[in-house]
Image (spheres, rainbow, N blue to C red):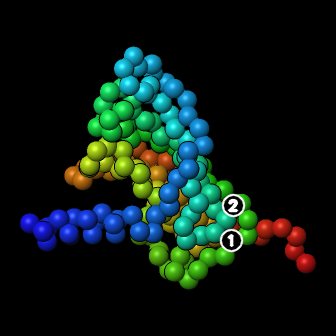
Amino acid sequence: MNIKRIMSVGLLVLSAVGTASAEEVGSVDTVFKLLGPDHKIVVEAFDDPDVSNVTCYISRAKTGGIKGGLGLAEDTSDAAISCQQVGPITLSDKIKSVGNRGSVVFQKRTSLVFKKLQVVRFYDQKRNSLIYLAYSDRLVDGSPKNALSAVPVMPWGKSE
């Protein structure tokens, strides 16, 4: 029993390593709820943990009501993402070598246990661009709903 508990905690900790945390930028209410918080759309910002000077903004639905207020509701799979270069970008060999597998750079729990919103980064070497794909998945099945943002790696500032 103790080994199972330790392994569960270990997996939980490892799943959070290497992913960014988001800061809430703002939100808008979409449905009034008499009891509990309203349904809303939340806008959050996070910086890519492996690529300095790339910031992504993600909007997502957040379920309110009594279940939402208690953290028991499952949010919908709707999300949008926009990423931009905010300074000079230097890509490490690690990022260039990931290939078409991509790297998870952001995760957000969207239900009590089984569902999460993820952002995966890909590097398109031919076009020298970073691609960010937002999608939602569950333990057993996911959703085909997704959103995409591309950041061309461009020179920054004045060249001498």
Residue 85: give its label.
2
Tag 1: amino acid: Ile
Helix, strand or loop at mark 2: strand
Single out the residue that lies furthest toward the top. Answer: 34
In the image, residue 122 sits, relative to residue 79, either above or below, namely below
The answer to which of 62 and 132 lies nearer the viewer is 62
Give the left or right position of residue 42, taking residue 63 as reference. Answer: right
Quarter of image, res 89: bottom right
Q: Give left or right: position of 18 versus 11.
A: right
Q: Residue 87, percent across and down?
A: 73, 65
Crowding at dot 1, Cα within 10 Å, few <14 / some 14-19 / many 20+, comes out as: some
Name the residue at 8% across, 66% down.
1
Residue 78 relative to residue 72: left or right:
right
Residue 81 in percent (x, y) is at 55, 48
Q: Position of residue 21 (x, y in %)?
A: 50, 57
Please report the residue visible at 40 percent of the width from the left and 19 percent of the height from the top: 33
Q: Circle 1 — which element?
A: loop
| Residue 99 in the image, given as x and y percentages of width and height | 47, 74
| Mark 2 surroundings: few (<14), some (14-19) or many (≥20) residues within 10 A | some
Tell me which residue sits at (30%, 31%) in the image: 67
- Callout 2 amino acid: Gln
Q: Residue 37: which numbered mark, if any?
A: none
Name the residue at the right extreme: 160
Instruction: List the residue tagged with mark 1.
Output: 89
